[in-house]
Amino acid sequence: MKRCVIVGGANIENYDAVRRKISKNDYFIYCDSGLRHSEKLGFEPNLIVGDFDSHEKPNLNIETIVLPCEKDDTDTFFAAKEAVKRGFDDFLLIGTVGGRLDHTLGNVSVLLYLFSLGKKAEMIDDYSEMQIVSDKTAFVDSSYSYFSLLNITGEAEGITEKNVKFPLENAVITCDYQYGISNEPLPDKTAEITVKKGKALLIKIRR
């Protein structure tokens, strides 16, 4: 099954960095004003969704789902749900970080939604790559400058970080004390991050 790439309308400055993460074999869903990224990314939509309150409704010979402006789901969340219905298990979200903070945080919840369904999901922007960590060990190699681990669900316990500048062993990170920011993999080492209880957001910062 192909990977599904969901393209939102947040700004993208470093198209080269984003293009390195996508391929012609991906299935592309463009959400509303995310369509403005199509030409610079160099990939046509396979599906377009949106209420078109921030972009003119396209007149293209491409499957398009027009949504009402007044609805519970954002265009991006609807796209994720639609892709799940179509059988996708692997997701990449781009154009979903920056600009309006409410939309950015809402898109983090899309990662949580996909994770809860057992899907593989990652969200990237010009500088970073984000994923949900729980149960299984995540890895950050030394090609990344920094990484942060944030509690976003109310509980994040049994946290261990190895091969890092600031190691942790069976630690707890709370929502009101996010001390897991800006750790670093040791030179020529791969950091190992585990969360035994709860879910955390891992943000890897590219060099």
Image (cartoon, rainbow, N blue to C red):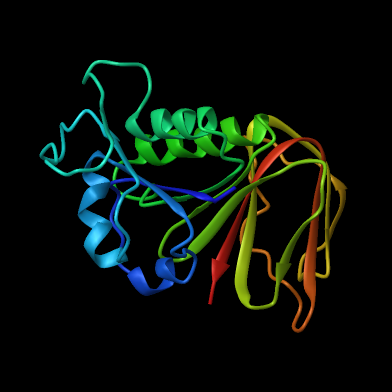
- Residue at x 24% of width, y 16% of height: 70
Q: Quadrant of residue 162?
A: bottom right
Image point 82% across, 62% down: which residue?
Answer: 167
Percent across and percent down for residue 56 are 10, 39
Residue furthest out toward the bottom: 188
The mark tally for this picture is 0
Residue at left 35%, top 50%?
98
Q: Is residue 106 above or below residue 17?
A: above
Image quadrant of residue 206?
Answer: bottom right
- Against 60, residue 147 (above or below) is below
Q: Residue 80 placed where, x, y %?
A: 47, 34
Outermost residue to the right: 170
Asked which quadrant contains residue 177, the reply is top right
- Comparing 58 with 128, the one in front is 58
User: x, y percentage for residue 41?
Assistant: 31, 64
Q: Foreground: 100 or 78? A: 78
Task: Tell whether 131 sits left or right of 81.
Answer: right
Q: Is residue 69 left or right of residue 111?
A: left
Q: Is residue 62 left or right of residue 183?
A: left
Which residue is rendered at x = 68% and y = 64% of the image? Answer: 183
Residue 157 spot, x, y in % from top left: 81, 38
179 to the left or right of 37: right
